[in-house]
């Protein structure tokens, strides 16, 4: 409720009736958090438009479409149902910067109640009809008007999440034969052994129904991974390579490259480099990718996890729209997904997590020595990325290089050094 109060007060500008659009995914706790946020926003004098379960990119789109002052998505993305969170969008449809989020967080510790609306200026809340149709039409318009998906049999895994209605409907309206799975959310089964983080059941279904392609979204549908007709998974790096090459050949690619994070595979960088395109790397997080895209005039960016941003269409990652771009390439080339979507051979990459119990293990001398030794062993033919998780008490250790045995060994050495520090503590 205090988040609603603070965010509502932060985005009031002028004397007009201020409005907020509020969406959520299918988690059981969404009901509770939604009601608390509504109370906070109304207390701050803002009218609330309730969207119900809807993808995160739809909230980003509807902020602008409905001329709202702020957008809110209640979701913990790909996390299990027990987790939940609040994503905030400004009136331009972009996620808030760290600076603005910090300002809102600082207000939570103050007596925000003192600045709330008078009794006659309280906000109202109402459910908005037709938002699914708006988003479906928006997604369909990202393809050429003449483009049809007829002739394609598509399995779509909705992760029992926010896109369980809109994704199958959009694909069917575009002419595809659609087989939807994990499209029966019950509040507890979001991302449970399904979706983009667990595409095994999708691969089985693709094989079972002899589909041409499988599409796996995550809980709030801002990311996607693809499964080809053989059941092989195509990650975000391959998807970015495919779309970037297609847009480059049609003179649509801006900025001469792609923005990705430090976690993207070295194979993507080499693939782009062979075509005279640059790979710009940022720290992990889609907001940092978007900020770099905006600052340097690039229109494709994303993460290996399948979070792809195409700024020609959207201000955030959009799993459905990304999938439609992949499907468009398949239709144009009239080749199987396995041929179209495999653009490069990934460099061997190992990512392992080690749980921490507080402290600063990365600053200890034994861990620093292990990291330095790993970097010297990898040399110029590999990369090492070590970072704390943003959502869990974990440190993620990733290495890649042309020698898979060496990559595995250096990751294990660093993990061992961090574990030793944890035990000593």
Image (cartoon, rainbow, N blue to C red):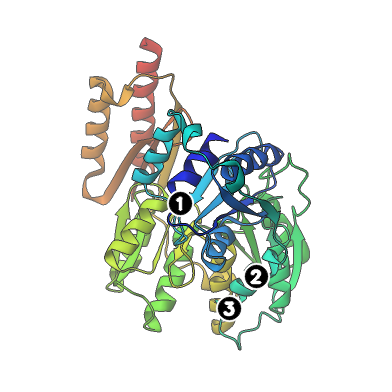
> Is 135 situated above or below 186?
below
Q: Quadrant of residue 81?
A: top right
Query: Hey, which quadrant is residue 297 in on the image?
Result: bottom left
Q: In this view, does 391 lie to the left or right of 347?
A: right
Along the polypeptide, which appears first: circle 3 or circle 2? 2
For the question of whether residue 111 can be seen, the reply is yes
**Mark 2 = which residue?**
134
Query: Outermost residue toward the bottom?
Result: 146
Q: Gap between marks 1 and 2, in whole Å?
A: 26 Å
Q: Residue 228 carries which label?
A: none
Q: Residues within 10 Å of mark 2 (few under 14, many from 20)?
A: some
Please give the residue where the numbered disc 1 appears in the rendered image.
Answer: 12
Q: In this view, does 298 lie above or below 110?
A: below
| Residue at 49 percent of width and 52 percent of height | 305
Q: Classify residue 49 as left or right of residue 13.
A: right
Q: In which quarter of the image is the N terminus?
A: top right
The residue carrying mark 3 is 141
Using the rendered view, name the quadrant where residue 251 is placed: bottom left
In space, the residues marked 3 and 2 are separated at their CA atoms by 11 Å
Q: Where is residue 184 in the image (x, y as percent from the top left)?
A: 79, 51
The residue positioned 63% from the left and 68% from the top of the image is 135
Label located before the other in sequence (1 or 2): 1
């Amino acid at each position: 409720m205090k988040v609603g109060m603070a965010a509502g007060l932060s985005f009031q500008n002028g004397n007009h009736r201020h409005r907020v659009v509020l969406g959520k995914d299918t988690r059981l706790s969404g009901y509770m958090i939604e009601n608390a946020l509504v109370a906070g926003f109304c207390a701050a004098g803002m009218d609330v438009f309730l969207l119900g379960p809807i993808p995160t990119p739809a909230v980003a789109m509807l902020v602008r479409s409905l001329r709202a002052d702020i957008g809110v998505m209640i979701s913990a993305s790909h996390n299990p149902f027990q987790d939940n969170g609040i994503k905030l969008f400004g009136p331009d449809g972009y996620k808030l910067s760290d600076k603005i989020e910090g300002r809102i967080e600082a207000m939570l510790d103050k007596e925000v109640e003192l600045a709330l609306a008078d009794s006659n200026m309280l906000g109202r809340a109402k459910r908005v009809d037709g938002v699914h149709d708006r988003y479906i039409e928006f997604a369909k318009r990202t393809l050429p008007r003449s483009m049809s998906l007829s002739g394609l049999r598509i399995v779509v895994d909705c992760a029992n999440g926010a896109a369980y209605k809109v994704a199958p409907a959009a694909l069917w309206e575009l002419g595809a034969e659609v087989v939807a799975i994990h499209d029966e959310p019950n509040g507890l089964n979001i991302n449970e052994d399904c979706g983009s983080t667990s595409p095994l059941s999708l691969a089985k279904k693709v094989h079972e129904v002899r589909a041409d392609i499988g599409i796996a979204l995550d809980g709030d549908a801002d990311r996607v991974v693809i499964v080809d007709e053989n059941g092989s998974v195509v990650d975000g790096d391959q998807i970015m390579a495919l779309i970037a090459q297609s847009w480059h050949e049609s003179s649509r690619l801006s900025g001469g490259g792609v923005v990705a994070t430090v976690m993207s595979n070295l194979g993507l960088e080499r693939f782009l480099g062979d075509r005279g395109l640059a790979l710009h790397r940022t720290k992990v997080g889609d907001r940092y990718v978007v900020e770099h895209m905006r600052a340097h005039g690039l229109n494709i960016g994303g993460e290996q996890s399948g979070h792809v941003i195409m700024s020609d269409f959207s201000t955030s990652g959009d799993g459905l729209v990304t999938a439609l771009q992949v499907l468009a390439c398949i239709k144009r080339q009239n080749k199987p997904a396995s041929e179209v979507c495999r653009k490069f051979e990934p460099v061997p990459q190992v990512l392992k997590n080690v749980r921490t119990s507080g402290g600063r293990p990365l600053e200890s001398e034994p861990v620093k020595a292990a990291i330095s030794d790993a970097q010297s062993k990898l040399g110029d033919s590999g990369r090492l990325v070590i970072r704390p998780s943003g959502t869990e008490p974990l440190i993620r250790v990733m290495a890649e290089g042309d020698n898979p045995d060496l990559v595995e060994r250096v990751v294990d050495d660093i993990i061992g050094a961090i574990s030793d520090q944890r035990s000593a503590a």
